[in-house]
Image (tube, rainbow, N blue to C red):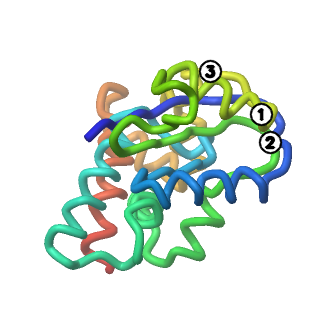
Amino acid sequence: MEVSITGWRGILKEKERIIKKLDELRKKNIACQLMDAEKVYGKEHLMAAINHAVRAFLYKTNSCNSLDMEILLYASGKRQIKDAIEHIGIKRKGSFVLILIGETPLSNYNGKIEKGMQNFMADFGLKRDDSVIEGSIEKLKKFGISEKEIKTVDASMYGDLILEKVAMVDVIK
Protein backbone atom coordinates (compact mmCIF):
# COMPACT_ATOMS: atom_id res chain seq x y z
CA MET A 1 0.00 0.00 0.00
CA GLU A 2 1.32 3.38 -0.98
CA VAL A 3 0.80 6.59 1.00
CA SER A 4 1.28 9.93 -0.72
CA ILE A 5 1.06 13.27 1.13
CA THR A 6 1.51 16.39 -0.98
CA GLY A 7 0.99 20.12 -0.54
CA TRP A 8 -0.77 22.45 -2.98
CA ARG A 9 -1.48 26.16 -3.24
CA GLY A 10 -3.92 28.27 -5.21
CA ILE A 11 -7.56 29.02 -5.78
CA LEU A 12 -9.57 25.83 -6.03
CA LYS A 13 -11.59 25.96 -9.20
CA GLU A 14 -14.79 23.94 -9.10
CA LYS A 15 -14.78 22.59 -5.56
CA GLU A 16 -17.71 20.28 -6.30
CA ARG A 17 -15.97 18.84 -9.38
CA ILE A 18 -12.81 17.95 -7.44
CA ILE A 19 -14.93 16.21 -4.81
CA LYS A 20 -16.56 14.17 -7.61
CA LYS A 21 -13.15 13.29 -9.06
CA LEU A 22 -11.90 12.20 -5.64
CA ASP A 23 -15.03 10.05 -5.31
CA GLU A 24 -14.07 8.35 -8.60
CA LEU A 25 -10.67 7.51 -7.11
CA ARG A 26 -12.38 6.13 -4.00
CA LYS A 27 -14.37 3.74 -6.20
CA LYS A 28 -10.99 2.36 -7.33
CA ASN A 29 -10.14 1.53 -3.69
CA ILE A 30 -7.93 4.56 -3.24
CA ALA A 31 -8.47 6.42 0.01
CA CYS A 32 -8.09 10.11 -0.68
CA GLN A 33 -8.56 13.19 1.42
CA LEU A 34 -8.08 16.84 0.57
CA MET A 35 -7.83 19.22 3.51
CA ASP A 36 -6.89 22.73 4.56
CA ALA A 37 -3.10 22.88 4.99
CA GLU A 38 -3.45 25.80 7.40
CA LYS A 39 -4.43 23.27 10.07
CA VAL A 40 -1.80 20.64 9.25
CA TYR A 41 1.38 20.53 11.32
CA GLY A 42 3.67 18.41 9.18
CA LYS A 43 3.61 14.94 7.68
CA GLU A 44 3.97 13.36 11.12
CA HIS A 45 0.58 14.87 12.05
CA LEU A 46 -1.03 13.27 8.99
CA MET A 47 0.74 9.93 9.38
CA ALA A 48 -0.53 9.76 12.97
CA ALA A 49 -4.07 10.47 11.74
CA ILE A 50 -3.73 7.78 9.05
CA ASN A 51 -2.38 5.23 11.53
CA HIS A 52 -5.15 5.93 14.04
CA ALA A 53 -7.80 5.70 11.30
CA VAL A 54 -6.44 2.40 9.96
CA ARG A 55 -6.28 1.02 13.50
CA ALA A 56 -9.88 2.11 14.13
CA PHE A 57 -11.00 0.07 11.12
CA LEU A 58 -8.89 -2.92 12.17
CA TYR A 59 -10.45 -2.96 15.63
CA LYS A 60 -13.90 -1.93 14.37
CA THR A 61 -13.94 1.22 16.50
CA ASN A 62 -14.27 3.52 13.49
CA SER A 63 -16.84 6.32 13.61
CA CYS A 64 -17.04 6.81 9.84
CA ASN A 65 -17.90 4.45 7.00
CA SER A 66 -14.81 5.31 4.96
CA LEU A 67 -11.11 5.51 5.70
CA ASP A 68 -11.01 8.95 4.05
CA MET A 69 -13.46 10.44 6.53
CA GLU A 70 -11.91 8.64 9.48
CA ILE A 71 -8.56 10.20 8.53
CA LEU A 72 -10.20 13.63 8.42
CA LEU A 73 -11.71 13.04 11.85
CA TYR A 74 -8.35 12.16 13.40
CA ALA A 75 -6.42 14.87 11.53
CA SER A 76 -8.85 17.49 12.81
CA GLY A 77 -8.73 16.29 16.41
CA LYS A 78 -12.53 16.56 16.48
CA ARG A 79 -15.14 14.05 17.56
CA GLN A 80 -17.89 14.88 15.07
CA ILE A 81 -17.40 14.70 11.31
CA LYS A 82 -19.35 17.96 10.86
CA ASP A 83 -16.89 19.71 13.18
CA ALA A 84 -13.94 18.04 11.44
CA ILE A 85 -15.07 19.27 8.01
CA GLU A 86 -15.62 22.77 9.35
CA HIS A 87 -12.21 22.76 11.06
CA ILE A 88 -9.90 21.18 8.49
CA GLY A 89 -12.03 20.73 5.37
CA ILE A 90 -11.08 22.41 2.11
CA LYS A 91 -11.73 26.05 1.40
CA ARG A 92 -11.86 27.69 -2.03
CA LYS A 93 -8.43 29.34 -1.81
CA GLY A 94 -5.22 29.03 0.11
CA SER A 95 -3.20 25.92 0.75
CA PHE A 96 -4.22 22.29 0.61
CA VAL A 97 -2.93 18.85 1.49
CA LEU A 98 -3.81 15.82 -0.60
CA ILE A 99 -3.52 12.35 0.92
CA LEU A 100 -3.73 9.29 -1.33
CA ILE A 101 -3.57 5.76 0.03
CA GLY A 102 -3.74 2.74 -2.22
CA GLU A 103 -2.10 0.86 -5.04
CA THR A 104 -0.84 3.02 -7.94
CA PRO A 105 -3.23 5.95 -7.56
CA LEU A 106 -4.10 7.99 -10.64
CA SER A 107 -3.38 5.10 -13.00
CA ASN A 108 -5.18 7.01 -15.77
CA TYR A 109 -1.99 9.11 -15.96
CA ASN A 110 0.16 6.22 -17.21
CA GLY A 111 0.91 5.01 -13.69
CA LYS A 112 3.30 7.91 -13.02
CA ILE A 113 2.05 9.12 -9.67
CA GLU A 114 4.04 12.36 -9.46
CA LYS A 115 3.10 13.44 -12.97
CA GLY A 116 -0.44 12.22 -12.48
CA MET A 117 -0.91 14.27 -9.34
CA GLN A 118 0.55 17.37 -10.99
CA ASN A 119 -1.90 17.00 -13.89
CA PHE A 120 -4.83 16.08 -11.66
CA MET A 121 -4.41 19.06 -9.33
CA ALA A 122 -3.46 21.50 -12.11
CA ASP A 123 -6.87 20.75 -13.66
CA PHE A 124 -8.31 22.43 -10.57
CA GLY A 125 -6.01 25.45 -10.55
CA LEU A 126 -3.57 24.24 -7.89
CA LYS A 127 0.25 24.20 -7.93
CA ARG A 128 2.47 21.83 -6.01
CA ASP A 129 4.01 23.35 -2.88
CA ASP A 130 4.99 20.88 -0.18
CA SER A 131 6.11 23.72 2.09
CA VAL A 132 2.43 24.26 3.02
CA ILE A 133 2.59 21.06 5.07
CA GLU A 134 5.30 22.36 7.43
CA GLY A 135 4.30 23.32 10.97
CA SER A 136 4.38 26.75 12.56
CA ILE A 137 3.18 28.48 15.73
CA GLU A 138 0.43 30.13 13.67
CA LYS A 139 -0.81 26.70 12.60
CA LEU A 140 -0.83 25.52 16.21
CA LYS A 141 -3.03 28.48 17.12
CA LYS A 142 -5.33 27.92 14.11
CA PHE A 143 -5.63 24.31 15.19
CA GLY A 144 -6.93 25.52 18.56
CA ILE A 145 -3.84 25.16 20.72
CA SER A 146 -3.59 28.02 23.18
CA GLU A 147 -0.59 30.24 23.84
CA LYS A 148 -0.47 28.76 27.35
CA GLU A 149 -0.24 25.20 25.95
CA ILE A 150 2.47 26.26 23.49
CA LYS A 151 4.52 27.78 26.30
CA THR A 152 4.44 24.52 28.27
CA VAL A 153 6.76 22.74 25.81
CA ASP A 154 10.07 23.34 24.09
CA ALA A 155 9.84 24.35 20.40
CA SER A 156 11.16 20.92 19.41
CA MET A 157 7.97 19.41 20.89
CA TYR A 158 5.36 21.62 19.20
CA GLY A 159 4.36 18.77 16.90
CA ASP A 160 3.61 16.65 19.96
CA LEU A 161 0.82 19.08 20.90
CA ILE A 162 -0.94 18.21 17.64
CA LEU A 163 -0.24 14.48 18.03
CA GLU A 164 -1.87 14.66 21.44
CA LYS A 165 -5.03 16.13 19.86
CA VAL A 166 -5.03 13.37 17.23
CA ALA A 167 -4.69 10.69 19.91
CA MET A 168 -7.45 12.29 22.00
CA VAL A 169 -9.99 11.47 19.28
CA ASP A 170 -9.86 7.84 20.49
CA VAL A 171 -10.66 8.97 24.00
CA ILE A 172 -13.56 11.27 23.06
CA LYS A 173 -15.18 8.90 20.52
Q: What amino acid does circle 3 point to?
A: Asp
Q: Secondary structure at mark 3?
A: loop
Q: Marks 1 and 2, how far apart in space? A: 10 Å
Q: Marks 2 and 3, how far apart in space? A: 14 Å
* Quadrant into which the C terminus falls: bottom left
Task: Give the percent coordinates (x, y) of residue 40.
Answer: 51, 42
Which of discs 3 and 1 lies nearer the camera? The answer is 1
Q: How many marks?
A: 3
Q: Earlier in the sequence, mark 1 or mark 2?
A: 2
Could you tell whether 171 is left or right of 130 in the image? Answer: left
Q: Secondary structure at mark 1?
A: loop
Q: Is residue 152 visible?
A: no
* Residue sitting nearer the eye, 173 or 162: 173
Q: Is residue 75 above or below residue 134?
A: below
Q: Marks 3 and 1, how far apart in space? A: 16 Å
The residue indicated by pointer 3 is 129
